[in-house]
Image: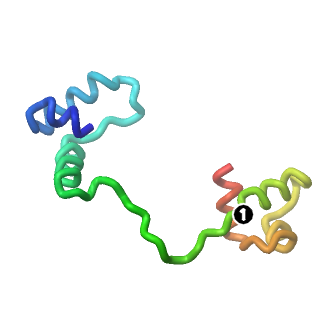
């Protein structure tokens, strides 16, 4: 995206048009403001999100929940919580994701 913006001489509208031409099958096409934002972020060194350590650790419950459902497809989220000690909200989120 940033390369297309530079190719168009930092003209965001032209970059948006060129992007639409090059990627006609894209599900969505970015607005010209996205190109401006990407350029400003990239120039300011803020483009890549660096994950900082700390915060609450994320549990790796996916396999446990999916195995529980595989063994009994009709099991409820509450039953999964009781059998695996995975919080109900986490089990719900995992099932929604898979």
Residue 80 in picture, x, y percent from top left: 82, 66
Q: Residue at x 34, y 25 (%)?
A: 23
Residue 29 in picture, x, y percent from top left: 32, 35
Q: Is residue 71 above or below residue 10?
A: below
Colour scheme shown: rainbow
Q: Outermost residue, right direction?
A: 71
Residue nearer the viewer, 97 or 40 = 40
Q: Is residue 25 above or below residue 46?
A: above
Residue 13 in the figure: left or right of residue 74: left
Residue 45 in picture, x, y percent from top left: 23, 57
Q: Residue at x 21, y 26 (%)?
A: 18
SS at badge 1: loop
Residue 57 in picture, x, y percent from top left: 59, 73
Q: Characterize the local packing of mark 1: few (<14), some (14-19) or many (20 or more) Cα atoms within 10 angstroms.
A: some
Q: Outermost residue, front direction?
A: 53
Residue 2's image quarter?
A: top left
Write down the residue under mark 1.
Answer: 61
Q: Residue at x 50, y 77 (%)?
A: 55
Residue 77 in the figure: left or right of residue 71: left
Residue 35 in the figure: left or right of residue 79: left
Residue 91's image quarter?
A: bottom right
Q: Residue at x 66, y 54 (%)?
A: 96
């Amino acid at each position: 995206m940033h390369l297309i913006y530079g190719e168009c001489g930092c003209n965001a509208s032209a970059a948006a048009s060129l992007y639409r031409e090059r990627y006609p099958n894209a599900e969505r096409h970015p607005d010209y403001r996205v190109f401006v934002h990407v350029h400003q972020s990239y120039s300011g060194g803020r483009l890549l999100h660096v994950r900082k350590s700390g915060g609450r650790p994320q549990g790796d419950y996916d396999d446990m929940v999916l195995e529980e459902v595989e063994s009994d497809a009709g099991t409820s989220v509450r039953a999964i919580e009781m059998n695996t000690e995975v919080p109900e909200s986490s089990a719900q989120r995992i099932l929604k994701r898979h």
